[in-house]
Amino acid sequence: MRQLLAKCGLSRELLRAVAALAAAMAVIASSWLEAQAEPSETPPSVTVATAKHPTDPKPGNATQEDSKQADFKPVDSTRLLDRQLRLGNNLVEKLADKKPGQANVVASPASLAIVFSLLDLGANDQMRLAIARTLGFGDAKETAKRDLETLRSAGTSVVRRSSAGGPLALANLIVIDPASQPYQPTLDRLSAAGAAVSIEDIGKPETIAHINDWVKDQTRGLIPTVIEERPDKAGIVAVNALYFKDRWKAPFDPASTRDEQFHMPGGKSTPVRMMHADGHFTFRQDGKFVAVELPYASEDYRLVIVTSKDAPLGVHEFAGAASWLGGQGFSMLEGEVAMPRFSASSSEELLPILDALGLETARKAPGALKGLAAISQSISEVLQKTELRINEEGTEAAAATAVITTRSAAATPSEYVKMIVDKPFMFALRDRRAGLVLLQGYVAEPASVTD
C-alpha cells in the first residue's frame, strides 16, 4: 500500500484530508435527504398544551424555517380578485336559490377563503386541490399550492396592516381539542401564518364562550356569536373574523336624504331613506345596467354597486354585470347618485354549497387533513355570519367564518349619468391592495339603518 501511495504521489497527510472531506460530504448529503422527506410520511410527535386564551395572533414559537414559509410573497391582487369575485358570485347565487322568493344575500369570500387557506397547511394533495377548486381557483393541480400560498400571504399582509391601524382589521383563531393530538410543527406553521392557536376542550361550554367572545371582540360587537350550539366530538374550530369601518371620501349630505320608494321584483315596493349626491363619480353602464364605484377615505378600499336601468331584477339576472363588481371598465363622469341607507346581515351554513362547488369527495376521504393532528379530522360545519351598515357617513361591516371538524375516521357611457338605486342591486366591498372581497351580496329589500 505504501508503494502504491508513493506511486500515486500522495502523502498520508493529504489522504487524511481527502478522507475527512469525503466524510463531511456524506453527512451533508444525509442531512439534505432527511430535509427533503415528506413531513406527513413520518408524523411528528404529539404536541402538548400551549397558551389557553391567546389574544395576539403573533408567530409565537415558530421555527426559523416556519417563519421563512410564512413570509408573504408579492400578491397578484388582480388574479386573486378575479377568483374572489368568482367565489362570491357562486356563494350569492347558491344562497339565493335556498331562500324563498327574492331575499337579501350577503357573504364574505375573503373570510371564507382565508380560513380555508389555513386548513390547507394540514391538507393532503387531494384536499388541497379540492379547496383550491371550491375557492374559485380551478382544477390546475400544479397551481393549487401556489394559489393557496398567495391567499395566505394576502391574509397575512392584512393581519400585519391591522396591527398598524386603519379601517380593516382581520384575525384568525385556531382552537384544537387535545383529544385530536395535534402536531406541534403544524401549530407552529399556523401561528407563523398569523393565527392565534389555542388547545382547549371544545366540548366545554366555556371554550365555545371563549370563541364567541373572541369573535365579538374582533368584530367590535357587530357579530356577538358565531357558534350557537356546542358541536359534538369537535376536533378543531378554525375561525376568521374581519371588521371594516371607514368614511366615504365624499360623504352624502344628510339634509338631502329623504323618503322614497324602493321597487322590488313582482311589483311590490317599500319605503326607504334615500341618500343623494351629485358631482363627479366613477361610473360604468350599458343598455341594461348602471354601476358606481364609491371611494372611501382610505384609498385601498372601494364599494361597487350595480343596479338595473329598468325593471327590478332577481339575483341571477345580474350575471351579465357580475364582473363589474371588480371595478374594471369604469370612467370618471359627472352625474348624480341616489342610494338607500341600509343594513344587511346573514347567518349561513355554507358546507352544502361548498360541497356542491367541489369540496365533498375530498373532505370525506380518510386523511384529508392528516397534517393537522394524529386523529383523523373531517369538516362537519362551515358557519358564516355577516353584518353590513351603510349610511351618509360611510360603511361599517363585519364577517366571521367558523370551520368545525369532527374527530372520526363595456359600453361607452354618456357624459352625464343619473344612477337611482331604487330597485334590487348587487354590491361588493373590496380591498384593492390585497385583492380580497370583504363582502359581496344582493339586496332585494333594504333594511333600515339604526343611528
Image (cartoon, rainbow, N blue to C red):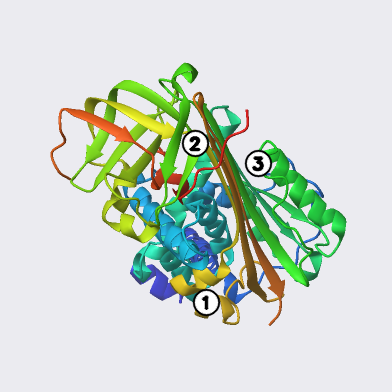
Mark 3 falls on what kind of element?
loop
Q: Quadrant of the C terminus?
A: top right
Could you say which disc has been placed on residue 352 in the image? Answer: none
Reading the image, the residue beneath label 1 is: 360
Residue 67 image point, x, y percent? 56, 47
Of the numbered discs 3 and 1, the one sitting upstream in the chain is 3
Which residue is nearer to you in this view: 434 or 21?
434
Q: Is residue 142 above or below residue 438?
A: below
Q: Are marks 3 and 2 in contact (CB under 8 Å)?
A: no
Residue 47 image point, x, y percent? 76, 62
Reading the image, the residue beneath label 2 is: 272
Mark 2 falls on what kind of element?
strand
Q: Is residue 315 above or below residue 282?
A: below
Q: Residue at x 37, y 40 (%)?
A: 305
Instruction: Say which amino acid is labelled 3.
Output: Lys
Q: Nearer the viewer, mark 3 or mark 2?
A: 2
Q: Residue at x 50, y 52 (%)?
A: 104
Mark 1 falls on what kind of element?
helix
Of the numbered discs 2 and 1, the one sitting upstream in the chain is 2
Which residue is nearer to you in this view: 15 or 297?
297
